[in-house]
Amino acid sequence: MELSEKDIRENCPHCNSKSQAFEFPLLETKNFRVVCDAHPIIEGHLLIIPKEHVSCIAEYSGELYKEFLNLYQKFSDFLVSEYKAVSSFEHGIFGQTVFHSHVQMIPLGCSPLQIVPEGLDKIHKLKDLAGLKKLFELDGGYLFFSIGENKWTTDVSLSAPRFFRDRFSKALGRPERGNWKRMRENPELLKLAQKDDTATQNKWNVYNKKNE
């Protein structure tokens, strides 16, 4: 049976603005909420989440996409300014554990082979984010990540739940933070996560005020 819009929103943590996912807000706009990841891999880990229940960037309307690009650049600048590096990733349906678009941004600078050690033949250079829409139409999904200004998609045959989250956490030396569901059950990790999120929120507030 197909779920109604009401059922979808009641069962989606990214549709409910009072859920744990929004405990550490950074910015709210007409169509988006930007928040600290409730289970951060590292300080500076944040999410850009559309208010509309859509699966991924490739399903954004023209209006959503335009606003998203502005936010993506704004928070890229923030992470580079405050943490000296920026990467991002999105499971374009493949590997999602929450089926509502949430583009993850994180301070990390590394080789793409640290994220996809299977080899350069398993990653494909992406000119810009607009290319994700075509990939979504052709393949029904994608695995997108970026490091600095460089953007790639990954061979979808590698797809697995939490695909990028597990790999980014390993690259950052924090494999214990890959599985957010296990983090949620670990009081010690949750305490550290809240400390990281508070620090990110404080840095954003200072940065944003300075750059208004």
Image (cartoon, grey):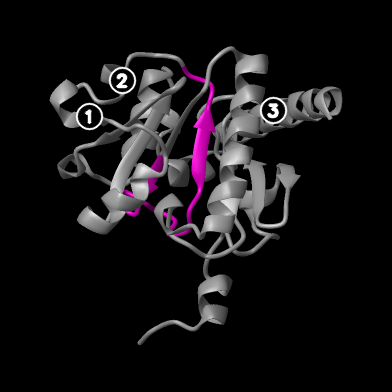
Residue 188 location, x and y as percent? 58, 32
Q: Residue at x 51, y 74 (%)?
A: 8
Q: Secondary structure at mark 3?
A: helix
Magenta range: 90-108
Determine the image quadrant of residue 192: top right
| Side of 112 relative to 25 (left or right) | left
- Which residue position is annotated with label 2? 112
Determine the image quadrant of residue 143: top left
- Which residue position is annotated with label 3? 200
In the depicted structure, whether residue 91 falls above or below residue 192: below
- Which residue position is annotated with label 1? 123
Determine the image quadrant of residue 163: top left
Counting labels gives: 3
Quadrant in the picture for the N terminus: bottom left
Q: Is residue 103 magenta?
A: yes
Mark 2: give few (<14), some (14-19) or many (20+) Cα within 10 Å: some
**Closer to us: mark 1 or mark 3?**
1
**Closer to us: mark 2 or mark 3?**
2
Q: Secondary structure at mark 2?
A: helix
Residue 83 location, x and y as percent? 61, 15
Q: Residue at x 52, y 22 (%)?
A: 86
